[in-house]
Structures are given as C-alpha cells and as structure tokens.
Image (cartoon, helix red, strand yellow):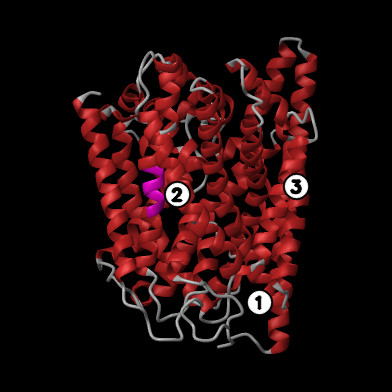
Amino acid sequence: MAQQKEAWGSRIGLILAMAGNAVGLGNFLRFPVQAIQNGGGAFIIPYIVCFLLMGIPLLWVEWASGRFGGSRGHHSTPFILNSMDKRKFWKYIGVFGIFTNLAVAAYYCYLESWTLSWVYHTVTRTFAGQSQDQVAGFFGDYVGLNSVEPIVFWIICLLLNTWILSKGLSGGVEKVAKIGMPLLIVFGVFLAVMAVSLKAGEHGAINGGSVGLNFLWTPDFSTIWTPKVWLAAAGQIFFTLSVGMGSIQCYASYVRKKDDIALNAMSAGWMNEFVEVVLGAAIIIPISVGYLGIDKVIEMTKSGGLGLGFRTLPFLFEQWGTALAIICGVFWFGLLFFAGVTSSLAMGTPWLGFMSDEFGWSRKKGAWSFGAIVLILGLPTVLFFNQGVFDEYDYWAGTVSLVVFALAEIILFAWVFGMKRGMNEINSGGDIKVPMIFGFIIKWVTPILLLGVFFGALITPVGNDWVGAFQNGWQLDNGSIIKKITNSGLKEQIAAAQTAGDQSLADALLEKKLYINGARLLLLSVFGGVAYLVFVAYRKRIKEGRFE
Amino acid sequence: MSNIALFMMISTVSVVTIVTGYFFWKVLKAPPREEPDSFLENDDEKR
C-alpha cells in the first residue's frame, strides 16, 4: 500500500472531527421542532429506536466501508464502493458521495455565514432596542440582499473553510474540531442553564423555563403508532448523523485496518446524540415559550426552527440586559457557527481525497478548487434565496440524495459485500465487540427502515395523514417527491393567483418556477460533471494499470 | 412540570449522558496500539 499522504493527529481528534461532522445546526434548530410536532416527549421513543436500528448500523457500515477502501488507497466513495464490488456501476453510485457534499456545502456555507454575521451584529448592538418585528424584519432584509453584507460574510466563511481545508486533516480539520467541539458544548451548557432557570416575571418573561420543558417533554402517547411520527423520527436520526453523505467514509478511510472503528463510531455517534437531545432540547424551546407563550411557539415552529433561531432569539436575549444579551447572543450564534463549520469542513474532504487519489492534486489545490466550486454553485442560493433556490438545493442534495445513497450503500455492504465479511470488517481492530444481532439488523432492519423513509418521502399522502390515506384513498401531498418533481404545489399556486386575477403574483410565481428548474439543472450538471470525472479517473487507472 | 414530562426528560437525558460518557471513557482508557497506527501525534518521526 502506498504511504498515506494524510493522517489524523490523534484518536480523540478523529472522534471530535466525526462528531463535529454530525453535529450541525439541525441539532439545535430541527430536533426540538420535530419533537414538538410529533408527540412531544413520546417522540423520543421512536427516535431512540431509530437511532439503535438505523443510525448506529449506518455509522458502522460507513466507518467500515471507509476504512476498507482507505486500506486500498481510496479516499472517496466512487472507488471505495468499487473496491467492495467490482461491478462498474458502483463507482457511479459513489458519485453521490462527492456530489452531495459539494451541493450541500454550497448552501450550508451561506447558512453558516448568517451565524457569523449575527455574532457581529450582536456585538455591535444592532438588535438593541429593536422590537421583535424589527429583528424578524432584519432577517428578511438580510436574505433579501438589501445590502452587500450577506455576500461579504459568505465570502469570509468560504475563505475560512477553504483555508482550514488547505491545512489538511490533522493541521486544519482536526484542530478546528478540537477547539470547536468543546467550545460548542460549553456554550450549549451555559445557554441551557440560562434557559432552564428562566423565571416568570423576571426580565419580562411570561413563563418559567420549566413551562417550555414541560411543553417539549410531555408525551402524547396517542401519536406513537402513527407512521408520520416514525417517519419523522427516522428522518431526524438520518439527517442528524450525516450518514448517506460520503464524508464519514472519507474520514474513516484514513484509519488503518488494525485500529478501532467500532468504539470510535459509537463514541462520535453518541456525542452527537448528547448535543442534540441534552443541549438541543434545552435551549430554544424553553426560552421561546418563556417569552412568547406556547401558542405563539406552536405557530412559529410550523415554518421550522430557522425562524426561531435567527428571527426571534436575538430579540429575546435583549430582554436580559446588555451584558447578558451580548454574552448569550455570541454564545448562541458562536455555537451554531462551530456546529456549522465542523460540518462544512467534512463536506470538503471527499473532493480533496478524490482529486488527490485520482489526479495527484495537492491538498492546497484541492481546497481552493473546492472553494471555487462552492462559490460558483452557492452563488444562486445567495442571490436567489427568496426565489427558492436554497430550499431546492436542500431538498434534492441535502435530503433525497442522502436517503438514496444510504440505501444503495447498505445494500452493497450487507447483500453484496456480505454480512460475514462486513461484521469482520467492523470488528477488525475493535476495542469493543459489536453484538452479532447487529449483523441481522444491518441486513434486514436498517434497509427496511430506509426503504420506509424513502417511500414515505416519495408518496407522502396529503397532510401527512397516513391513516386517512389508507382509509379514504391516496392523494399525494405537494411535499412528496413525485409532486415536487412536477412542481405541483407551485402550479396550483400559479393557477390560484390567475383565477383570483392577481397577475403580479402569478408572474412572480412563474419566475420562481424558472429559478427552481434552473437550480435543478445546475444540480444535475454537477452530478454529471462529477460522474464524468469518475469516468476519466477510471480510464486513467486502467491506462496506468492501477486497477485491482 | 408534570411528573410524566419530568420522568421522560430525566430518564432520556440521563441515559444519553451516561452512554455518551461511557463510550468516551472507554476511548480514553483504551490501550494505545503498536506503531505504525493511524495517528501522527504519537509518532517518533513526523510523516
């Protein structure tokens, strides 16, 4: 085996980088909202079950696949997958593991730049004395590009990511994880204590912190057997662990065969759960309910957690006085920044690994080319955020692609590579022995759950009402993949606007449709471009006699 | 907080914290491997 050019500095660094890859903004903004919308405290039961039956198995599969490919000199999914089975199409399935990271980084870095910008505005007291509507309006103006500031912060964020990536795994990614993860936990614990100790009547709060916690954790057991709740739990586990992206395989490809992956995967996976369940649940909801009341928070969570995080929390922190407003604002957006940057760095490494393995690129060249691709691909998400380009990237690259790729890789691992070899690979060098029952789970239960998540998204019934769909006939929701492809919801809105005689709205929606289709075309081009590079690399390998 | 909400919260937070701590402790306590291992910091010579 050729000597590896890249390596991890330490085992703790590897685990923190892996945990940092998984811990993202969703841990703090998505999880609590999902819990509230799906049975409160009862949500945790399907959530934990899905973690055990889908999350942990996928973590082991991805760590094992990555190390297996890495030991054969492959550090990105096209040739990692191809090293597990010689059929040529696997390397094209592996394209997902590079494409997804490029496309997600394109919009994720923009999201990350908001956190940096909000830290700046917290320190410079932009939100001081503003009403809640004004703070919310600030967000609207920001993404509406009323100034060049969002672009400046985005470029700073991109440069920062590129520069860190150019320093390599141990000199860049690992150092950031070693600083960022502990800081994130310290910030999170501080904010959780502040949120939980909130008292009604103090600093204008109408409820104590316990009211929000009670609201979040009171179980509605009547929801526990509804498919919607299980799909939401499976989806949350899937997206929180960053599985199905290709970044875990890439990180694990730098681990030697005789070194542990079984315990490392557990440690990194559970660390993500700690940040999500213990810290993520204890900040945003208790503070929001404390100031806004339960009804208002229910209303606000319908549009996801971003609104609460960016439009509302800065206003609420201001109620605590200048010093605490600055400390808590910096901690909250700093925490989100560290959660974001440790994830976006992981998105850069598969591209770097691929270009280094196949075309001999230096990490600096790889890092700057990654920055350039993300800049070009991300520009539409910045310029046309309000036209839905950001959401379109998130849906196709950040949601659908992950499920498709995870499904393919677990079929490869369990059914083609084989569970006997698979379990040996997971246990090789292990500091713990993975129970044999997981061989059965990886082969049967996890693929079935993944199929459930995929078909749940493909044919979501109207209003996510699964029971009603089975009883009263199946009508697809506009959020289902099938209806999304045909822009069904948008077409209905256009027709409604035309019927109501609102031509300006109809024109705006038609323009939005154009941008959405453009975004899809761009994503398809990126996928095609990466697939072409894989083809060129394959031909190059044959020519050089490098193929096993 | 209601008793059931308190029970759900304390039991979940406790389990997640204990399991996370347990695995991290096991990593810290695991004996180092013979060289060459995957990690640079314990190398005699830098790669």
Classed neighbour count for the residue bearing mark 2: other residues with Cα under 10 Å, few (<14), some (14–19), many (≥20): many
First-in-chain label (2 vs 1): 2
Classed neighbour count for the residue bearing mark 3: other residues with Cα under 10 Å, few (<14), some (14–19), many (≥20): some
Name which residue lies at 44% across and 67% down: A63
Q: Tell which of A399 and A451 is nearer to you.
A: A399
Classed neighbour count for the residue bearing mark 1: other residues with Cα under 10 Å, few (<14), some (14–19), many (≥20): some
Give how far apart the Cα atoms at labels 2 and 1 are.
29 Å
Residue A357's mark?
1
Left/right of residue A435 with respect to residue A335 in the rendered view: left
Secondary-structure class at tag 2 = helix
Looking at the picture, how far across and down is residue A265, in whole percent?
Answer: 39, 63
Residue type at tag 1: Asp
Quarter assignment of residue A234: top left
* Residue A231 shows up from this direction: no
Give how far apart the Cα atoms at labels 2 and 3 are.
30 Å
First-in-chain label (1 vs 3): 3
> Is A196 drawn above or below residue A411 in the view shown?
above
> On the rendered image, what quadrant is the C terminus of chain B found in?
bottom right
Q: Chain of mark 3?
A: A
Residue A155's mark?
3
Quarter assignment of residue A160: bottom right
Whether callout 2 and callout 3 share a subunit is answered yes
According to the picture, the residue beneath numbered tag 2 turns out to be A238
Which segment is the magenta one?
A271-277
> On the rendered image, what quadrant is the N terminus of chain B found in?
top left
Name which residue lies at 64% across and 17% down: A134
Looking at the picture, how far across and down is residue A304, in whole percent?
Answer: 52, 30
Name which residue lies at 31% across and 24% down: A210
Q: Chain of mark 2?
A: A
